[in-house]
Image (cartoon, rainbow, N blue to C red):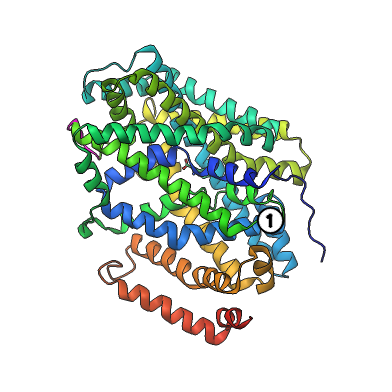
């Protein structure tokens, strides 16, 4: 069977790495990670999140990139081609559809958050953030959100910018912007951590992030950590799969994945180390919710030398990081409309953009006029976040590892991943036994159907993985076979 020819390729080896890091590093690291870590009580959450990145995020990311490159296309088309090559059920492509849908749904609330970052760049520069206390800053945040015109204006600006860049095509827009801003962002975070170090409450912030309190582990926290691992690495949302489809043959998928995952994790941990000391030094509640960084960091900027300059630069860089993520959320949909239906990129961006504007404006209203419009207790903004992170992405992830681990002929993934036998066997072990069991257990636990505590009674999980591995290898001895190959 002849393989699909790539239509679009990254210009260099760094093309994918930059774009995927651009997609991964964003508001998830700087806004969401600190605030949910605060909500779920600190170290225990961080530990669960790191475990999810290692045991689930990395194997899923490798699988997604491999599926994208093998199928060379948007998530639906790429998966459809791979399953056709394997003579499997074409219904698998619905996993691609769900991923695209998740990416789009995320974008609908993400532009609102990105709008905060843009607005705060402006507020920082204009002096509107020169407020004397956390309470005063909380007021600024509240007032900003109370006005649909302000909040909506900034969201629309972000949405239009995103659509404009995506309409122009993938390499030109994404690669260039990110090349200079990633090191800049890292540097700013290091400056902020340096400030936090001298400001007095560093050890308290550090302890909050890295000391482990087992009583804080609940089904909900586990699900949040799993969901956040998917969110922060941009998995099962079309982004990584589509970007993966532009990788030239022969580039190492494993290496690339590790670079992206490490960069992403470092940025999140740096953000936590920058923010929590400021929070404790100013007597703020770490579980203050989505406004956490907007209420705490401006205070740090006020107190440090050249704070305004740093503050403007920082929020500007967060804005760019948010844009490079936003772009990747809609790239799959635009690529799909373009390839499958021959619609030009510009028109595809405009069409999906119209829908984006409507839904994101409705999501924005969750903070003011529509604060009481709730379904199952969720506003639209919270609902979009909850549904995508907690359920759709992990569900997409489990489907992809099952497809790759159980259904595809082993040559397909082995070819694509190009790993040494031991590396391949490890990947296979993860996608066949570890990742699916863990995702399933977290789902069952969150639904209250698990019947035991997965942390205190971890041996049940280890046992389930072991039993499945034993059974799997007896019925279809692939892992052993791969190791014995050479
Ligand atoms: N990973 C991005 C972030 O951390 C968010 C994202 C999710 C991007 C899904 C693309 C797809 O901000």
Q: Horizontally, is 426 left or right of 218 in the view?
A: right
**Which residue is at 58% across, 42% downward?**
18
Q: Residue furthest right?
A: 2
Direction top: furthest residue? 126
**Residue 299 in sight in this render:** yes
Q: Which residue is mark 1?
A: 69
Callout 1: CB less than 8 Å from ligand 1: no
Query: Which of the 4 image quarters holds residue 408?
Result: bottom right
What percent of the width, then of the height, locates residue 203?
20, 43
| Residue 292 seen | no
- Total count of labels: 1
Residue in the foreground of this view, choosing between 300 and 32? 300
Question: Taking 465 as reference, is 245 above or below it?
Answer: above
Q: Position of residue 200 (x, y in %)?
A: 18, 34
The segment highlighted magenta reads: 282-286
Looking at this view, is 446 or 423 the one in front?
423
Secondary structure under tag 1 reads helix
Relative vertical location of residue 289 with respect to residue 93 in this rendering, above or below: above
Residue drawn at the location 52% of the way across and 41% of the way down = 105
Foreground residue among 423 and 472: 423
397 sits left or right of 367 in the view = right
Magenta-colored segment: predominant secondary structure:
loop
Residue 214 as seen in the image, left or right of residue 175:
left
Give the residue displayed 69% in from the left and 67% down from the top: 415
């Amino acid at each position: 069977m002849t393989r699909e020819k790539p239509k679009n390729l990254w210009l260099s080896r760094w093309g994918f790495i930059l774009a995927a890091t651009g997609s991964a590093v964003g508001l998830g690291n700087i806004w969401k990670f600190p605030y949910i870590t605060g909500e779920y009580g600190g170290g225990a959450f961080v530990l669960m999140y790191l475990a999810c990145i290692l045991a689930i995020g990395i194997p899923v990311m490798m699988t997604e990139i491999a599926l994208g490159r093998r199928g060379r296309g948007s998530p639906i088309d790429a998966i459809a081609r791979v399953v056709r090559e394997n003579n499997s059920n074409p219904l698998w492509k619905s996993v691609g559809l769900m991923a695209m849908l998740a990416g789009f749904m995320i974008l609908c609330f993400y532009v609102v958050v990105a709008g905060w970052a843009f607005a705060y760049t402006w507020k920082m520069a204009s002096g509107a953030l020169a407020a004397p206390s956390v309470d005063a800053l909380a007021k600024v945040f509240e007032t900003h959100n109370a006005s649909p015109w302000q909040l909506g204006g900034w969201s629309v600006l972000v949405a239009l910018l995103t659509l404009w860049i995506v309409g122009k095509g993938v390499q030109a827009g994404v690669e260039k912007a990110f090349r200079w801003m990633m090191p800049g962002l890292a540097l700013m975070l290091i400056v902020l951590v340096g400030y936090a170090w001298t400001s007095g409450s560093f050890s308290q912030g550090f302890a909050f992030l890295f000391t482990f309190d087992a009583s804080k582990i609940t089904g909900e926290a586990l699900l949040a950590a799993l969901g956040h691992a998917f969110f922060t690495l941009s998995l099962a949302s079309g982004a990584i799969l589509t970007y993966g489809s532009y990788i030239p043959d022969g580039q190492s998928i494993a290496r690339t994945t590790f670079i992206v995952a490490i960069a992403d994790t470092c940025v999140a941990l740096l953000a936590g180390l920058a923010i929590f000391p400021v929070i404790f030094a100013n007597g703020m509640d770490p579980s203050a919710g989505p406004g956490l960084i907007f209420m705490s960091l401006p205070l740090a900027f006020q107190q440090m030398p050249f704070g305004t300059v740093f503050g403007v630069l920082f929020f500007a860089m967060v804005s760019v990081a948010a844009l490079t993520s936003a772009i990747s959320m809609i790239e799959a949909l635009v690529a799909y409309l373009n390839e499958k239906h021959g619609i030009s990129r510009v028109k595809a961006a405009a069409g999906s953009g119209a829908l984006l504007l409507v839904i994101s404006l409705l999501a924005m209203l969750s903070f003011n006029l529509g604060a009481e419009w709730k379904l199952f207790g969720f506003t639209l903004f919270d609902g979009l976040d909850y549904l995508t992170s907690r359920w759709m992405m992990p569900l997409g992830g489990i489907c992809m590892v099952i497809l790759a681990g159980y259904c595809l002929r082993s040559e397909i993934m082995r070819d694509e991943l190009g790993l040494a036998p031991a590396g391949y066997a490890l990947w296979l072990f993860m996608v066949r036994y570890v990742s699916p069991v863990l995702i399933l257990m977290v789902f069952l636990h969150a639904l209250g159907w698990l019947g035991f505590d997965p942390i205190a009674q971890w041996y049940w999980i280890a046992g389930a993985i072991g039993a499945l591995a034993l059974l799997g290898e007896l019925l279809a001895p692939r892992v052993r076979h791969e190791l014995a190959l050479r």
